[in-house]
Amino acid sequence: MRLFAPASPLARFIYRHIRVIHVFKISLALLIAHIINYLYPVPYFAWTSVTIVIIMLTLPQVGGTLEKSLQRVVGTVLGALYGILILSLTSNPALIAGLTLLGIALTAYRASGRMGYSYLVAGFTLMIVIDGGKQGMTEAAWRTGTILLGCVIAVGVSQLILPLRARNEWRWLFSDSLIRMAKVWQMHLSTNVHRPLRTRSFLAGIDQRLQRQKGLRRSVTLESPGLRRFDGEIGELIQAQERCLLLLELLAQTRWETSASALSIQRHYAISLQAKQMGQQLLALAAFCAGESPFLPPRGEDHLQQLKTQMQAELAGAAGGFNAQGYAWLIYQMGLQISLLTTLIHRMAGEADLRHS
């Protein structure tokens, strides 16, 4: 499966109108649940609707819905089985209380870690079973069944009706992040050398997309088994973007101490040209990752070495002194991160995509 393959018009339509589509899908899932309840009424069917809302409300992606469904099922089954086991082994109130507290302690300890939602569900399922006594065992069985039905409906609607793939949302967020970086980069290369650049909204937008990418990482690998081997690369891409964001913030907020410092940099046309090419590379990467272009820019190790050599030669004895050297260091560090981004994308794209570059 190619992460950066061109997306279909339907996939783009879903991504652009995801809020409206998401509302429609939740409503459809609840309608299906109530139709089933009307045709085949069973006890505790409200848990089916509750499960659908909890799973789908904040997770429009297929991968996110699948992940939360699995965690809810695991938590419900574990909590119910442990509660039934306690009630089957003893009727001593003190022993029941002790074993229950032990189970709650374990779920509380693990609730903040991986699969934390499963432990949360296990904890309150356990309390429902224990508080219900012997009747709670019957309730646990019905509740588990209705929750499973809710998970099946939620995953089925998410998967089959206008599905939003987590991998598509992730790569479009990544592409948009690169575009915003390129815009900030171009703004910083403008002739304005004294006034602060108005980049706050762009930088905030990059940070928002980074946080969203982090949240989608698990869903991407869970939804697409073929992409699980790239989980490390996805993490590295996010970290590289974070470093780029930090460097862009420094470049956007840094201004020259004297006019001579600014003029000394402006005279280094070769460095300015290389910097502009780096901005173009970001845009080319964004177009490829969004599936809008089949051409992947070269890795650029030679280009980066050339930039370093030119900087060392042109800044020797430069009038800008400390300012010029610091600016050159930031430019070079940004180049390193762009080169890393390109290398990671090459690795993830695979030979099927590289032959077009």
Image: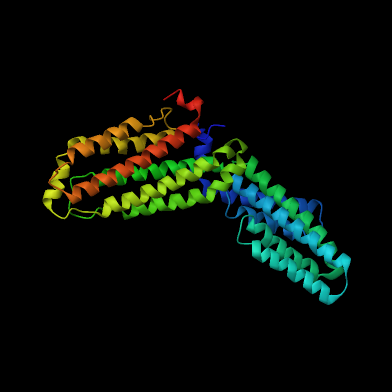
Q: How many marks?
A: 0
Residue 290 visible in the displayed image: no
23 to 314, vertically: above or below = below
Q: Nearer the viewer, residue 7 or 26?
A: 7
Please provide percent x and percent y for residue 186: 27, 43
Please provide percent x and percent y for residue 132: 81, 70
Q: Quadrant of residue 75?
A: bottom right
Residue 138 visible in the displayed image: yes
Q: Nearer the viewer, residue 292 or 339?
A: 339
Please provide percent x and percent y for residue 173: 45, 44
Q: Residue at x 48, y 33 (%)?
A: 347
344 to 329, vertically: above or below = above
Q: Looking at the figure, which quarter contains the N terminus? A: top right
Q: Residue at x 48, y 27 (%)?
A: 353
User: What is the basis of the colouring in this image?
Assistant: rainbow
Residue 153 relative to residue 327: left or right: right
Please provide percent x and percent y for residue 13: 50, 39
Residue 6 relative to residue 61: left or right: left
